[in-house]
Amino acid sequence: MALFSKDIRTMEDLFMHQLRDIYYAEKQIVKALPKMIDKASDSDLKTGLRHHFDETKNQVTRLEQVFEMMDGRAKTVDCPAIDGIIKEANEVIGDVEDKDVLDAAMIAAAQAIEHYEIARYGTLIAWAKELGRDDCASILGQTLAEEKAADKTLTQVAEARVNVTAAA
Amino acid sequence: MALFSKDIRTMEDLFMHQLRDIYYAEKQIVKALPKMIDKASDSDLKTGLRHHFDETKNQVTRLEQVFEMMDGRAKTVDCPAIDGIIKEANEVIGDVEDKDVLDAAMIAAAQAIEHYEIARYGTLIAWAKELGRDDCASILGQTLAEEKAADKTLTQVAEARVNVTAAA
């Protein structure tokens, strides 16, 4: 962030800034997921997280596509939000011993990540449309649909078994 | 966070931990909103944020009620997630000069905050029910409904005028 100048002047600047923010976030999520997959006990949770790990790598590629379509080099800006969300996830996960309670804590952490992405992609799609870039909005829309589906799957896994077992 | 012990043993411990996390988060949001209200230009955005500021203070009180019902003293734990989300909001807001683009950036920031809360309250409600505490779930459900409504209002304000003006 610039200290002495206002770097974001137009809506397109703001869009590009937000794109770099979520690009950084997705890369951090790709780094964070393997640890969560490793620590998960419930088999549906493990499978769901693994599937989402593959999706997330694909989402990084989609963002690179959007950068290209906007004639911009794919680059990141620091995203204190995702850093904080992942830090909090690691802290809670490190504080739980019981494997069922740990699964419940990990679902909560994963859903906080999903919701951050749902908010960001929702905004990016609205801005892309306003900028007349329906082509970018359409690509970002594919990712938003995946994030919403991942969030729903996590809720199902939690309600079907993980929360019940953890509270037993 | 304890460094040498596993502090969260049961689902109830996890629930109480998450309650303290969102209690801290709500208090930070109460501190952050006045600056956003002050910087907003669009009158519907200003009104919406003001309304949500009042709601948020009430949500803090509701959490204190739930602490009491759980026989626990209302206390906070650090929540790096909300700290990161608010830090990011302040950085972006500080980097935008144009008042219309700033309004669009602030709506995005507010929606990231809303989505964090939607994720957390959704989890807390599911856990409360699993713990046989429908009474707590019901109170937390009132807040969740408000967060979802606030998110929807922000989308409406963005789509009806703010994004259009900012991209013009």
Image (cartoon, coloured by chain):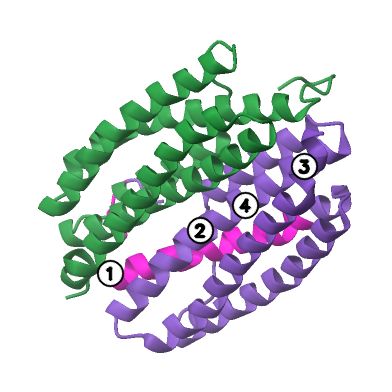
Chain colours: A purple, B green
Residue range (magenta): A4-33
- Asked if labels 1 and 4 touch by Cβ distance under 8 angstroms, the answer is no
SS under mark 4? helix
Q: CA distance from mark 2 to mark 4?
A: 23 Å
As for residue A32 lying within the magenta part, the answer is yes
Callout 2 secondary element: loop
Which amino acid type is marked by label 2? Val
Count residues near mark 1 (Cα–Cα under 10 Å), then give few for <14, some for 14-19, many for 20+. many
Q: Earlier in the sequence, mark 4 or mark 1?
A: 1
What residue sits 46% from the left and 24% below the top?
B63
Which residue: 68% across, 62% down? A153
Q: Residue at label 1?
A: A11
Would you say residue A110 is visible in this rendering? yes
Q: Nearer the viewer, mark 4 or mark 1?
A: 4
Determine which residue is flagged by label 2.
Answer: A77
**Above or below, A25 relative to A88:** below
Instruction: Tell me, yes or no, whether dots 2 and 3 are on the same chain.
Output: yes
Q: Are marks 4 and 1 on the same chain?
A: yes
Labels in figure, total? 4
Q: Amino acid at mark 4?
A: Gln
- Rendering coords of residue A143 (x, y %): 56, 74
Of callouts 4 and 3, which one flags the residue occurring earlier in the amino acid sequence? 4
Q: CA distance from mark 1 to mark 2?
A: 17 Å
Chain holding disc 1? A
The dominant secondary structure in magenta is: helix
